[in-house]
Each structure stands twice: as C-alpha cells, then as structure tokens.
Image (spheres, rainbow, N blue to C red):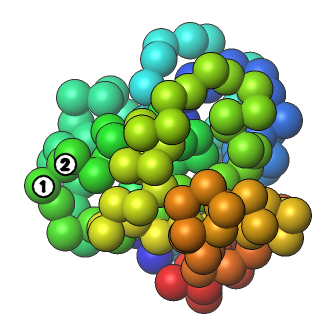
Amino acid sequence: MKTMFCIENLGFSQKNYELFLQINKIVEKSIEEISICPLNITNKATHVNTAVYNIGELSTYKDGLLIVTRIKDVEKITSIATNSIKVLYLYDLDWMFDKMKYDEIYTALTHPDLKIIVRSADYIKPLKNLCGVVPVGILEKLELEKLWNLL
C-alpha cells in the first residue's frame, strides 16, 4: 500500500529506528511504495532505503496513507486537501512530555478525517477520558503489514 510517514526529523530516536527498520524490511522484499517526509531537516541517523521528500511536496501526495506519529503534526496532514487516508500512530502520549494546549489536542484527536492507532492498550483509557476517542487499533510494534490490515 502506498504510504508516506511524516516524521519530526531523520535524527536518532527509538521511534525512527523502529520505523526505518520496518521500512527497510518491507522495501527489500516487496514493491510497496513507502516514503518519508521529515518536517525538520536533519542528518539521517541510520540508512533508510526509501524516498525522502521535502515538506513542500506533501500537498501533492494522493491515493495512499499519510501517517504522523505526534499529535502536534496532525494539523499538517489534516489541512491538506487530498484523498489520502490520514493516520495518527500515537507512539507516545505527547502531552506527557511536551506542553500542549487542551484545545489543540482535542481538535487534533477528534478530527473527522483522522484514524488513530495506538502503541499500547494503556493509551486507550487516557484517550477516552481526554476527548472520547476510541482508536482503530493497537500496534505495539510499528509493523506496516499489520497497520495496513487495521485500516
């Protein structure tokens, strides 16, 4: 399935490491079109065997999945007029680590075009309490084939 990940940067993090391993694994054995769009320019921490796009090209992405991993980045994909399926893979509960305004969190998580997948079953109760949202599914590891099957 055609998939683009909009990530904070290409620098080292556990989230990026897991994502890049998955992308390299899928690209090696299939013809699936997977790409990355870093929202901030940095050097790559590790090799990723796929296309890396500039944020300016995000609005031309059509007919696939657009995935972000942070609540802060939801607005970037939901504001694009495209027929792509927009997904938040909630890797961490962002408000636990960064200061965020409640209305921004609520607006992002309750967007009608957004599908939410969480990394842990422990995230479901806080999401329900915060804004009444129930995720589409749970993926403890970011396995792309399982993610595609959830949608």
Q: Is residue 33 visible?
A: no
Residue picked out by circle 1 = 81
Do the residues under discs 2 and 1 have CB atoms within 8 angstroms?
yes
Going 42% across and 39% down the picture, which residue do you hit? 103
Left or right of residue 113: residue 48:
right
Left or right of residue 45: residue 112:
left
Residue 22's place in the image compared with 136, above or below, is above
Callout 1: helix, strand or loop? loop
Q: Seen from this angle, which residue lies furthest front? A: 129
Callout 2: helix, strand or loop? loop
The percent position of residue 111, horizontal first and vertical second, equals 34, 60
The percent position of residue 151, horizontal first and vertical second, equals 51, 84
Residue picked out by circle 2 = 80
Q: Give residue 135's quadrant in the image.
A: bottom right
Q: Seen from this angle, which residue lies furthest left? A: 81
Q: CA distance from mark 2 to mark 1?
A: 4 Å
